[in-house]
Image (spheres, helix red, strand yellow):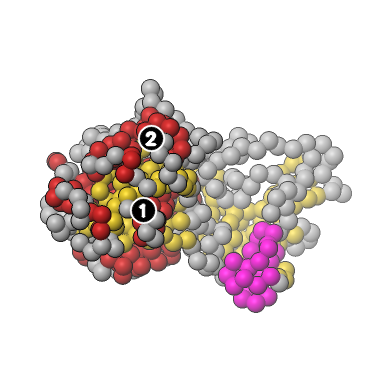
Amino acid sequence: MTAAVPLVDYLVLGDDPHLVAHQCLQCGARYFDHRNACAGCGATSFERAQVARTGTLKTFTIVNFAMPGIPVPFVAGVVDCDGTSVRGNVINVEPSTDHIRTGMKLRLATYSMGQDGDGVEAIGFGFEPV
Amino acid sequence: MASDDIYILGITMTKFGKHPTLDVLDLASEATLGALADGGVSIHDVGIIAAGNLSGMGTGLGQDVQKQVGQTGIPVYNVANACATGATALRTVMMALKAGECEIGLALGAEKLSGAGMLGLAETASEATWTPKGRFGAVAPLDGRIGTASMPGVFAQVGLEYGHRYGGVSFELFARISEKNHANSTLNPLAAYTKPMTVEQIMAEPMMAYPNTRAMCSANCDGAAAAVLTTGERLKSMSSEQQRRAVKVSASVLTTDPWEEGCQVLPNINTLTRNAATQAYEQAGVGPEDLGLIELHDCFATAELVHYDNLMLCPQGGAVDFFESGASLRQGRSPVNVSGGLESKGHPIAATGIANIWEICHHLRGEAGPRQIPDATVGLAHVIGLGSTCGVHILEKSAA
């Protein structure tokens, strides 16, 4: 089996891929980056919280210009996963307004980003239509 | 005039656009000397300078301008707050005057941005091995893989999020907002672009990030703006002409975004703008219905729509109806971006927060020529710098 690493540390791989957030123990605010303290209440204790794997598309854009190596057009958006806003691309769908609309139901999906020189495969994530 | 009020005594913006033969110091000096002359004072009268420049001087713009127009030994504050830098410079000077440190101050912003391309994208070299790095433990650059950080894309999502919440938005609606601003710029000789564009032309422009086409994006360009501020006390000793042309700063507010769910996922440019507007109306003792004109931060057509709502020019959720009613047209009840806005006048970032105040002053002084808004007595200038900072200034025609 090929060794695999997630694109970001908040993507948990395995049989049941999902996202985890740092959740503030005091106010419940959720974050995806490494934290020093809570921007909502100032507390410094966090627990790991699993983020719902399905959600609705709150907003999106179809991007036509990007860095080299990023295929365009692609759909960038924000998904409301049961109250937690998650940034991600909408994948496995034609990037056109005929197929993308706010309010559509989406679920987390992973994909291979290829292998590095050591044969390690990186796994990215996006959201695909349900 | 009350002694503790603050007035704009002199203010200038350069022509925005491409200035191949001028560097940022030429532009900044032109604006500075213009603002001093407009206010009838000299650099020797100035007690403080606050200056902004984001496009890479390396050293402080304020001191570099002093070396061109007068090294008088006064304190200089070089400030940076993204697209709110100009408003931050102005507010820095205001705070010094309010604190009694001096009686006359200069705020300045200048930029060389022609041909800068799309802002917000930074290329990172790919690695031979996947190595987690940074605050997300990422093994590859995230922009384009996990959403977008490009400005047209971020603000596109801001506009479509508003549509998701309240309905009524469409590609064509945003194009029509852009059409309004491009039409307005035909009356502004200092705008970077002064040609009208039809809705069809705007929609046929290259699509940057749906629904923002190139014509719906702020124009990177060169330009500078500067303002000379003084206290009401000092103004009393000045000429009747200076008193007549002085414009009162009846509100000056800077806010940042308070934490809300999702605000670190997609920048929330709404709450901090609404907070700034609320404070500004309170400070000035005026309401949105009193504004003769509004210059708001249309960095993208999608942004203009949400700011109708954030600045409370319409009931909450009513921005589409507000635009459809014609209220934001130059002949409407709340004219918005009669200068042409960032989409057509241009957006030399650090200059923008002063240039939009210049536009308001120009009308309040009755000096705006063919684009004059008749009988304008109060106006509002708004900027957003992502990160975020919001600056709102309310200006009032001098009673003198």
Which residue is labeled 2 in the image?
B70
Residue at 31% x, 46% y: name it.
B228
Horizontal arrangement in the rendering, residue A47 relative to residue B110 (left or right): right
Residue drawn at the location 23% of the way across and 34% of the way down: B189
Q: Is residue A13 above or below residue B184?
A: below
Label annotation for residue A45: none
Say if residue B42 shows up in the picture: yes
For this orientation, the residue located farthest to the top is: B21
From what the image shows, is residue A53 above or below residue B37? below
Q: Nearer the viewer, residue A19 or B123?
A: B123
What kind of residue is marked 1? Cys
Type of secondary structure dominating the magenta stretch: loop
For the view shown, which residue lies furthest in the right direction?
A: A1
At numbered mark 1, what does the secondary structure look like: helix, strand or loop?
loop
Numbered-mark total: 2
Res A82 quadrant in image? bottom right
Q: Point out the tag, 2 or 1, that comes first from the N-terminus.
A: 2
Q: Can residue B178 be seen here?
A: no
Mark 2 vs mark 1, CA separation in Å:
17 Å
Which subunit holds the residue at mark 1? Answer: B
- Which percent across, then down, holds residue B259? 53, 67
Q: Residues within 10 Å of mark 1 (few under 14, many from 20)?
A: some
Q: Residue at x 22, y 58 (%)?
A: B396
- Pointer 1: what residue? B102
Please tell me which residue is depicted at 35% across the width and 48% down the height of the picture.
B105
Tell me the element at label 2.
loop
Q: Dot 2, crowdedness within 10 Å: few (<14), some or many (≥20)? A: few
Query: Residue B245 in the image: x percent, y percent?
Result: 18, 49
Q: Range of the magenta residues?
A: A20-44
Q: Is residue A27 above or below residue B97?
A: below
